[in-house]
Image (cartoon, rainbow, N blue to C red):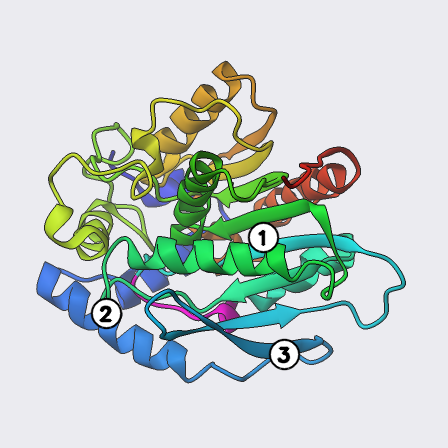
Amino acid sequence: MKVTYTMMDRELRWRGKLLGLLLGTSSEAKFVKTMFNRKKQSDKRKGSHMEGLNVREEWITRKDGSKLRILIYEPHHTNEEVPGILWLHGGGDAMGVPEMFENTYKKLMDTSSCVIIAPDYRLSIEAPYPAALEDSYDALLWMKNHARELSIRSNQLMVGGESAGGGLTAALTLYARDKGEVNIAFQMPLYPMIDDRMMTESAKENNAPIWNSDMNQWAWKLYLGDRYGKEVSPYAAAARATDYTHLPPTVTYVGDLEPFRDETIHYVEKLKQAGVPVDFELYQGCYHGFDIINPKAAVSQKAVAFFLQSYQYAVSHYFAEQK
């Protein structure tokens, strides 16, 4: 899908063009090098937080005895239990830290009081699939097992993330459903990275800024490692799932110019066919991550408001009792 400058929303054009020039890479080797460099840069954000947030760091133990860093964002004052949200950060599965998405955490907490658990999951340039999924699931179980001491409602455990984090969200809800150890009340996989096959129209030859077809393919190669090009598990690429029943109510949105457009639409259709309640919006003239690239754009504010309204509805209406 060829994307031209005039196809973009007017408020997104100049930033998209500028960042496309700055962030674009011409080869797989350069992309991998860029991901390594961005990881180093994002690592410097660790321990740096937005003013006014009540956040603390914990370390949980993986099955192999190693430690997983998680951040816990809590309300300043609460006399009641609140929903617990596991938020999985974006970054193409290859870079990023939880601290980078504190704007989202603050918006969620301001909309309806909650506790957010944000794991610093292993990245693909260090450990390919299933490392990130395993870390996400460990953090989910930890949230469930510590719900009482965190003042979290055990029947309102939610999961969300954007981009690669959205892909992890969709994979994690499948994995949790099949494991049967924890029930998720609501999921928020925003413009998720869920299909490694890249066979849809929007995923083919997409030259949009920020995230294009080449970058998507290279990121999937990093994430899947030796599994790339083979029949991989839906826990790696959620679009490969054949059973969408008993998944949690969902909210998602995506731009109409980005590679993930069609796979997100197909995912939504399959959820609806399986009887899962879904809130979905497709935003015209928008490339990948538009709401983060230019949060002041009218279309970005509209998308975020839609997402937060759906979250607020979920707090009042969606529950999943634990076994």
| Cα gap from disc 1 to disc 3, whole angstroms | 32 Å
Q: Tell me the kind of residue under disc 1.
A: Ala
**Residue at image point 22% right, 45% down:** 213
Q: Residues within 10 Å of mark 3 (few under 14, many from 20)?
A: few
Give the mark toward the camera: 1 or 3: 3
Mark 1 and mark 3 lie on one chain; the one further toward the N terminus is 3
Q: Is residue 132 above or below residue 187?
A: below
Horizontal and vertical percent position of residue 260:
35, 38
Asked whether residue 285 appears in the rendered view, the answer is no
Residue 72 drawn in magenta = no
| Cα gap from disc 1 to disc 2, whole angstroms | 35 Å
Which residue corresponds to mark 3?
56
**Quadrant in the picture for the C terminus:** top right
Q: Nearer the viewer, residue 298 or 100?
A: 100
Mark 1 and mark 2 lie on one chain; the one further toward the N terminus is 2
Tell me how many marks there are.
3
Q: Is residue 81 left or right of residue 199?
A: right
Q: Is residue 82 above or below residue 150?
A: above
Horizontal and vertical percent position of residue 61:
44, 71
Q: Quadrant of the rendered structure where residue 102 is? A: bottom right
Q: Write the start and end of the magenta stretch as one range.
A: 94-100
Which residue corresponds to mark 2?
126
Q: Is residue 133 left or right of residue 312?
A: left
Residue 95 drawn in magenta = yes
Q: Nearer the viewer, residue 123 or 173?
A: 173
**What is the secondary structure assignment of the residue under circle 2?**
loop
The answer to whether the residue labelled 1 contacts the one labelled 3, judged by CB atoms less than 8 Å apart, is no
**Residue at image point 56% right, 72% down:** 71
Which residue corresponds to mark 1?
297
